[in-house]
Image: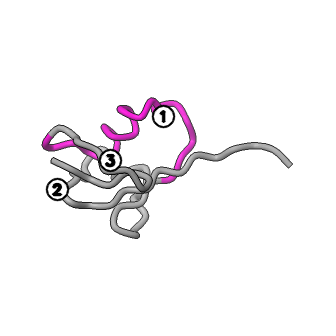
């Protein structure tokens, strides 16, 4: 299936969850926020939120600095 992830079209395995995508991006241990089609996905729901073909996903990590 194809989803737009952070503005880039990506091919993802079928049945990929938001949590699975975070892992695929190498952000498993990072503090991050996830949004699917402009709706925030709470951390507790990431493992059960299955992505669908054509959805738009934004994953945002926190960056320290001043």
User: What whole-number distance in Å separates the C-alpha atoms at marks 1 and 3?
Assistant: 11 Å
In the rendering, which numbered label is found on residue 6?
none
Magenta-tinted stretch: 14-33
Percent across and percent down for residue 48 are 25, 49
How far apart are the alpha carbons under marks 2 and 3?
Answer: 13 Å
Q: How is the image coloured?
A: one colour
Dot 2 falls on a residue whose secondary structure is loop
Callout 3 crowding tier (Cα within 10 Å): few <14, some 14–19, many ≥20: many
Residue 18: in magenta span: yes
Question: Residue tagged by mark 2?
Answer: 53
Q: Nearer the viewer, residue 25 or 46?
A: 25
Task: Mark 1 or mark 3: name the one nearer the start of the chain.
Answer: 3
| Residue 39 at x, y percent in the picture | 39, 68
Task: Mark 2 vs mark 3: give the one in front.
Answer: 2
Marks 2 and 3, the one that precedes in the sequence: 3
Residue 24: image x %, image y %? 35, 32
> Magenta stretch containing residue 60, yes or no?
no
Instruction: Kindly check if marks 1 and 3 are in contact, taking CB atoms under 8 A apart as contact.
Output: no
Q: Residue furthest right?
A: 66
The residue at 21%/60% (across/down) is: 54
What is the x, y in percent for residue 38? 40, 70
Q: Mark 1 sits on what residue?
A: 27
- On screen, residue 23 above or below 62: above
Query: How many labels were placed on the picture?
Result: 3
Residue that appears at 52% across and 30% down: 29
Determine the residue positioned at 51% across, 53% down: 33
User: From mark 2 to mark 1, how far is it between C-alphas?
Assistant: 22 Å
Task: Name which residue lies at 32% across and 47% down.
Answer: 18
**Residue at disc 1, secondary structure:** loop
The mark lying in front, picked from 2 and 1, is 2
Name the residue carrying label 3.
Answer: 18
Query: In the figure, is residue 19 to the left or right of 34?
Result: left
């Amino acid at each position: 299936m194809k989803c737009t992830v952070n503005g880039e079209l990506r091919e993802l395995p079928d049945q990929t969850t938001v949590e699975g995508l975070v892992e695929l991006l190498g952000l498993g241990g990072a503090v991050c926020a996830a949004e699917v089609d402009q709706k925030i996905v709470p951390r507790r729901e990431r493992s059960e939120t299955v992505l669908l073909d054509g959805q738009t996903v934004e994953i945002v990590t926190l960056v320290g600095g001043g």
